Image (spheres, rainbow, N blue to C red):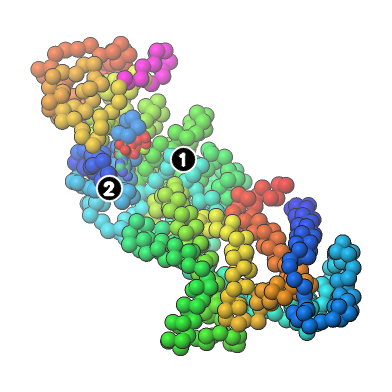
Amino acid sequence: MGERILDVKNLQIDFHTYAGEVKAIRNVSFHLDKGETLAIVGESGSGKSVTTKSLMGLLANNAKIVGGSIMYHGEDILKKSEKQMQNIRGKDIAMIFQDPMTSLDPTMKIGRQIAEPLMKHKNVEKKKALAQALEILKLVGIDHAEKRINEYPHQFSGGQRQRIVIAIALVCYPEILIADEPTTALDVTIQAQILDLMKELQQKIETSIIFITHDLGVVAGMADRVAVMYAGQIIEYGSVDEIFYNPQHPYTWGLLNSMPTLSSTDLEAIPGTPPDLLDPPKGDPFAARNPYAMKIDAEEKPPFFKVSDTHFASTWLLHPDAPKITPPDEIVRRQAIFAKMQANAN
Amino acid sequence: MKKYLLKRILYMALTLFLVATITFFLMKLMPGTPYSNQEKMTPQQIKIMNQQYGLDKPVWLQYIFYIGGMLHGDMGTSFQFSNQPVSYLISSRIGASAQLGVQAMIFGVFFGIIVGSVAAVYRNTWVDTTATIVSIIGKSVPNFVLAVLLQYYISLKLGWFPIADWGGFEYTILPTIALGVGPLAETARFIRTGMVDVLNSDYIELARAKGLNKFGIIYHHALRNSLIPLVTLIGPYTVALMTGSMVIENIFSIPGIGEQYVKSIQTNDYPTIMGVTMLFCFGLVLIILFTDIIYGIIDPRIRLNGNED
Ligand SMILES: Nc1ncnc2c1ncn2[C@@H]1O[C@H](COP(=O)(O)OP(=O)(O)OP(=O)(O)O)[C@@H](O)[C@H]1O
Ligand SMILES: [Mg+2]
């Protein structure tokens, strides 16, 4: 993979609320290399959106960055002023939102909405910007673009609107594209089209993607690497094959188990609920829902154990002294496939 | 669209007819006669006068004559204002009222939008609190109280503007403020609520993600979207300005329609009462139609639906 363009270290974010400090992001570290796609997966409320919003400097007013750094081109994004961030947003780092039905301005023609970042960042005059908007509109696969560029959002379907949102995000050829659940609100068939489009455009525009989802199913075809988030922490990360076929954390097992595949028919949602982030547990946050939990899980947070050069997991099960346990059948099946893949590679 | 307009105009005519009818009969129920010194008149004189003005005929016949005249554009002759035709009375006075109304509307809406937007952008700060207090005061203090206060402090004490009467632009300023503060307060409240919603919407977040600055976001995205609900206020504004003008024009001695209306009611000047009522009513139905058209211009979602009809 290419050079490292983004390096997040020990990020900690609290939200000030009436009930107290919500510790939404607790020591999150990850990085992004040029041209790759990193998927961040996790249940609702695990902190995926907060993490990505911090990259854009778009956190809510009640957010407080307690610690950490986000290095981008050798500079810490967290130390930048709002003015400096405005010059990065939409130009170097762009974002696609979850709900295409609400993320376009209903009173502005879509051409103008696509042209806006160009006018802002590239100092392009309106006419030229609209011409470029037309090009990108064709690129994202809107038919009759010449005519449709003068239409308003309500004249487009959900899938088309998400294509328009993608056009807005890509019009300045950003270095990093953040897609926060870009297909969750769409039909399955449309989902696949949008994902294909993103992959295709990633090649053309040479952008790196941070792909947020709570659905592991869409990750497999999309991502190079995967980070699994739980209760404001990353608990396991590795290449897409390592996470899918050699997962180590019981939470990752749970996610994979609750994912529909061809061979498994009985889906199991992970029982229980995530911990209260107002007062997070001091040990492994997943302990309360973990059938394999040990005494130490309740007392001490597990460090990251190295599985391979690219694969790390934060679970005491990887400690040399941990008792050997047998993962769920589905995971055993996957690990067998992984062993075969390893053997074939060698 | 054409069919739609035609239908609307038909309804407007029907509304006007109903208002004319109801007003006519209600007016006849008002106590008193048009004669200010009836005690001193002989029955003979009264009879002659009644004949002259057609008041000797049965009410239903008077009604038919009146409607008939209206259809020919004849609104009758005023009993009080030196026997001038009502149409002339109205046309000679409408200028002052219209100028005052338009100025008050522009003043109220313009500053209302500014106050409301600023309050929304700086919501839950002292700016917002101040704006809220100002709009509550503006809404709850009756405009005649405000008018008198302005006359006392600004004209009498400071001597900045004339206390009353109608002349150049400087004469219009105090009445404009007195009349416009109500709409201003209402606009500010509306815009604030609307804009707080809009500022929390996804498309504003997307606008921020584009790297737009605060001004660009407010001006290009938030404002237009928060203006949409404001359109519903145009009707109530008009009513407020019409009723307000009756009081304000009297206080500031402005020779407008409102002042005339009040006088005509006080003196049972039937043709003038009818004429001005019909004028106000016509203005109102026209404004309601206009509101619906504006809606379509401001909100593309509605525009399209209108075309499909
Ligand atoms: N402005 C805020 N004030 C208080 N708490 C917040 C705020 N924003 C987010 N949180 C909390 O931070 C945690 C992480 O939220 P986040 O939106 O990142 O979740 P997510 O992983 O994106 O979930 P989803 O899949 O539902 O989008 C949640 O517990 C949420 O309640
Ligand atoms: Mg989210």
Residue B4 place in picture, x, y as percent: 75, 52
Task: Please tell me which residue is depicted at 32% across the width and 48% down the height of the picture.
Answer: A60
**Image quarter for ligand 1:** top left
Instruction: Tell me if mark 2 has few (under 14), some (14-19) or many (20+) residues whose alpha carbon lies within 10 angstroms of its own.
Output: some
Residue highlighted by disc 2:
A63
Residue A67 place in picture, x, y as percent: 18, 46
What is the three-letter code of the residue carrying label 1?
Answer: Asp
Q: Which of A261 and B130 is in front in this view?
A: B130
Residue B20 makes an appearance in the image: no
Q: How many marks?
A: 2
Residue highlighted by disc 1:
A99
Name the secondary structure under disc 1: loop
Residue B287: quarter of image:
bottom right
Residue A323 place in picture, x, y as percent: 14, 13
Is residue B95 magenta-colored?
no
Q: Is residue A99 left or right of residue B281?
A: left
Is residue A260 magenta-colored?
yes
What is the three-letter code of the residue carrying label 2?
Answer: Ala
Highlighted magenta segment, given as a residue range: A259-271
Chain letter, disc 1 residue: A
CB-based contact (under 8 Å), mark 1 and mark 2 = no
Mainly helix, strand or loop, the magenta region?
loop
Chain letter, disc 2 residue: A
Q: Vertical placement of B212 versus A21: above or below?
A: below
* Dot 1 beta carbon under 8 Å from ligand 2: no
Q: Vertical placement of A85 versus A214: above or below?
A: below
* Dot 2 beta carbon under 8 Å from ligand 1: yes
Dot placed on the residue nearer the N-terminal end, 1 or 2: 2
